[in-house]
Image (cartoon, helix red, strand yellow):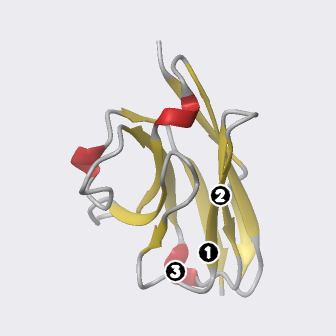
């Protein structure tokens, strides 16, 4: 059974940093794309970043480009999201997701497994 477990969320002041981790199990990690999404209260879940199965392709939402970095360690079956220069508008529950290589990694439908989410709160 596939499991994705996020960690690393918390409360941070504006301008601060956090690193989220997503530990995966249950299938061959190195053959799947890994994505990060977030959902703020009253809003739809939105794309944040994606990294391809090999790590060779990365893409970001415009709102986080230059501040967030997605990475993965296929030897540890773990994906990461380094978040720097955090802003209050980054406050949300952050979810990692796993899906087969495909053409629409910015869409939630690209992914077949999701983690439970981790809360990130940025105070002003």
- In the rendered image of this protein, does residue 100 appear above or below residue 79? above
Pinpoint residue 117: horizontal percent, then vertical percent.
52, 44
The tag on residue 71 is 2
- In the rendered image of this protein, does residue 93 appear above or below residue 76? below
User: Quarter holding the C terminus?
Assistant: bottom right
The tag on residue 64 is 3
Is residue 111 in view?
yes
Label 3, label 2: how far apart the Cα atoms are: 15 Å
Q: Residues within 10 Å of mark 3 (few under 14, many from 20)?
A: some
Label 2, label 1: how far apart the Cα atoms are: 10 Å
Q: Secondary structure at mark 3?
A: loop
Residue drawn at x 27%, y 46% is 110
Q: State the image quarter where residue 17 is shown.
A: bottom right
Q: Residues within 10 Å of mark 2 (few under 14, many from 20)?
A: some
Pinpoint residue 98: horizontal percent, then vertical percent.
43, 39
Q: Secondary structure at mark 1?
A: strand
Pinpoint residue 32: horizontal percent, then vertical percent.
46, 38
Residue drawn at x 75%, y 34% is 76
Residue drawn at x 35%, y 44% is 101
Q: Which residue is mark 1?
A: 68
Say if mark 2 contacts mark 1, CB within 8 Å. Answer: no
Residue drawn at x 73%, y 87% is 15
- In the rendered image of this protein, does residue 17 appear above or below residue 7? below
Label 3, label 1: how far apart the Cα atoms are: 6 Å
Q: Residues within 10 Å of mark 1 (few under 14, many from 20)?
A: many
Say if mark 3 contacts mark 1, CB within 8 Å. Answer: yes
The tag on residue 110 is none
Is residue 40 in view?
no
Q: Secondary structure at mark 2?
A: strand
């Amino acid at each position: 059974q596939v499991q994705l477990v996020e960690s690393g969320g918390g409360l941070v002041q504006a301008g601060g940093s956090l690193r989220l981790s997503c530990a995966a199990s249950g299938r061959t990690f190195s053959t799947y794309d890994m994505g990060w999404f977030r959902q703020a209260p009253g809003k739809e879940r939105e794309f944040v970043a994606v990294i391809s199965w090999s790590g060779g392709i990365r893409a970001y939402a415009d709102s986080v480009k230059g501040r967030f970095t997605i990475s993965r360690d296929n030897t540890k079956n773990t994906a990461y999201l380094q978040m720097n220069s955090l802003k209050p508008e980054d406050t949300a529950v952050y979810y990692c997701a796993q899906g087969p290589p495909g053409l629409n990694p910015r869409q939630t439908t690209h992914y077949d497994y999701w983690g439970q989410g981790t809360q990130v709160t940025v105070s002003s």
